[in-house]
Amino acid sequence: MAVNIYDSAYEMEKAIRSSQEYTNLKKLYDEVNNDPSAKTMFDNFRNIQMQLQQKQMMGEDITQEEVEQAQKTVALVQQHDKISQLMQAEQQMSVVITEINKIIMKPLEALYGAPENQ
Amino acid sequence: MAVNIYDSAYEMEKAIRSSQEYTNLKKLYDEVNNDPSAKTMFDNFRNIQMQLQQKQMMGEDITQEEVEQAQKTVALVQQHDKISQLMQAEQQMSVVITEINKIIMKPLEALYGAPENQ
């Protein structure tokens, strides 16, 4: 790989690390993870989310009971101030990463077209 | 998004666009696409590849006949000088993109762990 590609990638990494979105995400992530009851609640929520996603990907049926359990868990974490702030911060970070990817994929898009057009 | 994140992303894009890997890929891509018989052969190869990938993703069976047809098409394109050079260039570009992604995902990996550990 050309040296300036590496350099640019490390510049990009530094820019992400010092961005407001990342520092905010890290702060909230640490706060939630250092609070045992918040951490348990959030881990539980993530596990349920992941289980449902896996079922969906495997084409398995999701029961009404599972849907209701998931909805309850979402409602619960949304009421938790720190967790809902963390989820918002994750969402904002995800938008940034998507934007970055769109920009750096432009050269390949110029050759192969946008992914949604394939 | 913070201004320096955008700046870094555009710097990254420029570095990719001017890299040896990208200029080589673009040259070969144009050569293959401007040669009607090479283009037909390559498009055919890509279509067969995509059909098999889709079948795999949908969990559908791939017949022995389909495997043999795919192998024949691979053998055919590998004998075509320009196409096999293009495929090598795509592979090299893909390595670069993977490396870039690893670097710029380090800050998130620091929080959430590497994808393979999740």
Image (cartoon, coloured by chain):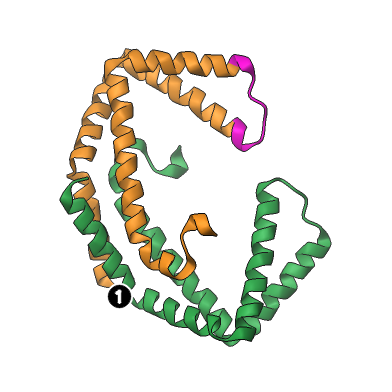
Chain colours: A green, B orange
Q: Is residue B69 positioned above or below A44 on the image?
A: above
Q: How many residues crowd around disc 1 within 10 Å: few (fewer than 14), some, or many (20 or more)?
A: some
- Looking at the rendering, which quadrant does residue A118 occupy? top left
Q: Position of residue A89 (x, y in %)?
A: 47, 75
Front-lying residue, A25 or A115: A25
Residue occupying image coordinates x 51% and y 23%: B48
Tell me where residue B54 sits by quadrant.
top right
Q: Is residue A73 left or right of residue A63?
A: left
Q: Position of residue A46 (x, y in %)?
A: 63, 68
- State the residue at coordinates (53%, 84%): A34
Above-or-below relation of A81 to B89: below
Judging from the image, mark 1 belongs to the subunit labelled: A
Residue bearing mark 1: A18
Residue B40 visible at all: no
Looking at the picture, which amino acid does disc 1 mark?
A: Ser
The answer to which of A71 and B117 lies nearer the viewer is B117
- Camera-nearest residue between B94 and A102: B94
Residues in magenta, as a range:
B55-65
